[in-house]
Amino acid sequence: MDDDLLIPKKRSVISQAWTRLSQIYQTTLDRWTPYTKCRWFCTLSLLLSFGLRVFFKQGWYIVTYALGIYHLNLFIAFLTPKIDPAMDFDADENGPELPTRANEEFRPFIRRLPEFKFWYSVTKSTVIALVCTFFDCFNIPVFWPILVLYFITLFCVTMKRQIKHMLKYR
């Protein structure tokens, strides 16, 4: 009975194939890491193809709106520091400042969402949205100018708050 526990179980063919595919996928991502401009160029061309598809097919405005909100969320996380000075209650009343003496600690700006993860999330969400445009079940009829106005308002309010926060805490 104890001998069954000591024998290592062989993984199934599907599990081995999935592991191998995930290794290939991760290797490809690792190779793309140093090529920032090329990565963003490919992502922007993907976004452009999505925009052209939505424009020429005249639909999928809900998908476009959801993609815009998600990208706005990612962008704000990209601009926000990992350690938010607004939540640092130990700091002075004026907020954190650069060190003025040699013995003071210098804390560099570390983003809450690193650039690579930002790029990866934008690319992945754009591919998902582009795939959604091939299915009519996602083409929900809406009056799109209201969505555009609401998105512009949301963008302006959010960015105004973010810029004020950035100016306040330098």
Image: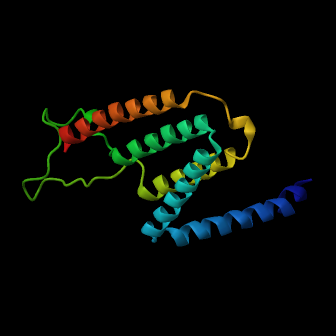
Q: Nearer the viewer, residue 34 or 66?
A: 66
Horizontal relation, residue 80 to residue 93: left or right:
right
On the image, which quarter does residue 46 sit in? bottom right
Q: Nearer the viewer, residue 93 or 2?
A: 93
Q: Quadrant of the C terminus?
A: top left
Whether residue 9 is visible, yes or no, is: no
Whether residue 150 is visible, yes or no, is: yes
On the image, which quarter does residue 114 sit in? bottom left
Residue 145 in picture, x, y percent from top left? 50, 30
Colouring convention used in this rendered image of the protein: rainbow
Residue 66 in picture, x, y percent from top left? 55, 37
View extreme (left): residue: 101
Horizontal relation, residue 126 to residue 104: left or right:
right
Horizontal relation, residue 32 to residue 110: left or right:
right
* Count of numbered badges drawn on the protein: 0
Residue 94, compared with residue 120, is above or below; it is above
Q: Nearer the viewer, residue 11 or 134?
A: 134
Residue 105, compared with residue 90, is above or below; it is below
Q: Nearer the viewer, residue 14 or 3?
A: 14
Residue sitting at x 34%, y 47%: 79
Horizontal relation, residue 30 to residue 3: left or right:
left
